[in-house]
Image: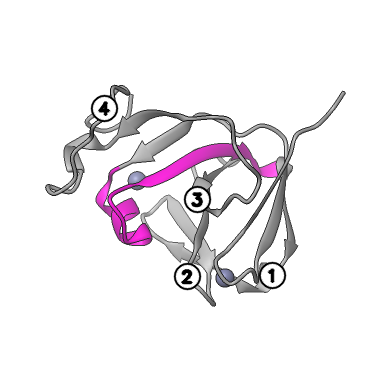
Amino acid sequence: MSETIYRGSCLCQGIQYEIHGAIGDLVECHCQRCRKANGSAYAVNAPIRVADFKILQGEHLLKKYQSTATTQRCFCSECGSPIISVKAETPDLYRLRIGTLDTPLQQKPTMHIFAASKAEWDDICDALPQYAERP
Ligand SMILES: [Zn+2]
Ligand SMILES: [Zn+2]
């Protein structure tokens, strides 16, 4: 059985990781916390299995920020790249920040979530389903 391996890294390349498995549905999240964490209109995140995620280099650089009571955001303490988030409700999954992937990805985004809290200057111009919060 062949296994898909994805590679990714942060902006400064200090953190290098591999994913030995599937990347779940790509979700564009417009919540204010994702906007602030990314300095952008939205974050593009996808679930991956914790067991599939391996940090090859720079684990000591990965800083955790407790964003809500149940969510930790993990980012590079050197360059600030957001890498994954960890939710207490789903301990077997990480939410990968897709923009840090180096391996080309065939998948496309599947939906917009927290569209009700999107930035007022941001227009959603595609036909993907939009959810006020979560589906
Ligand atoms: Zn970095
Ligand atoms: Zn969000």
The answer to which image quadrant residue 117 occupies is top left
Residue 21 shows in the view: yes
Q: Quadrant of the N terminus?
A: top right
Q: Name the residue: 32% across, 61% down.
A: 39
Question: What residue would you read off at disc 3?
Answer: 99
Residue 53 pos. (x, y %): 69, 47
Q: CA distance from mark 1 to mark 2?
A: 13 Å
The answer to which image quadrant residue 106 occupies is top right
Q: Give the secondary structure at mark 3.
A: helix
- Numbered label attached to residue 120: none
**16 in magenta:** no
Question: What residue would you read off at disc 1?
Answer: 58
Q: Is residue 47 above or below residue 70?
A: above
Q: CA distance from mark 1 to mark 4?
A: 36 Å
**50 in magenta:** yes
* Among the two numbered marks 4 and 3 on one chain, the one whose residue lies closer to the N terminus: 3
Q: Give the secondary structure at mark 2.
A: loop
- Numbered label attached to residue 80: 2
* Among the two numbered marks 3 and 2 on one chain, the one whose residue lies closer to the N terminus: 2
Residue 87 shows in the view: no
Residue 13 pos. (x, y %): 63, 68
Q: Nearer the viewer, mark 1 or mark 3?
A: 3
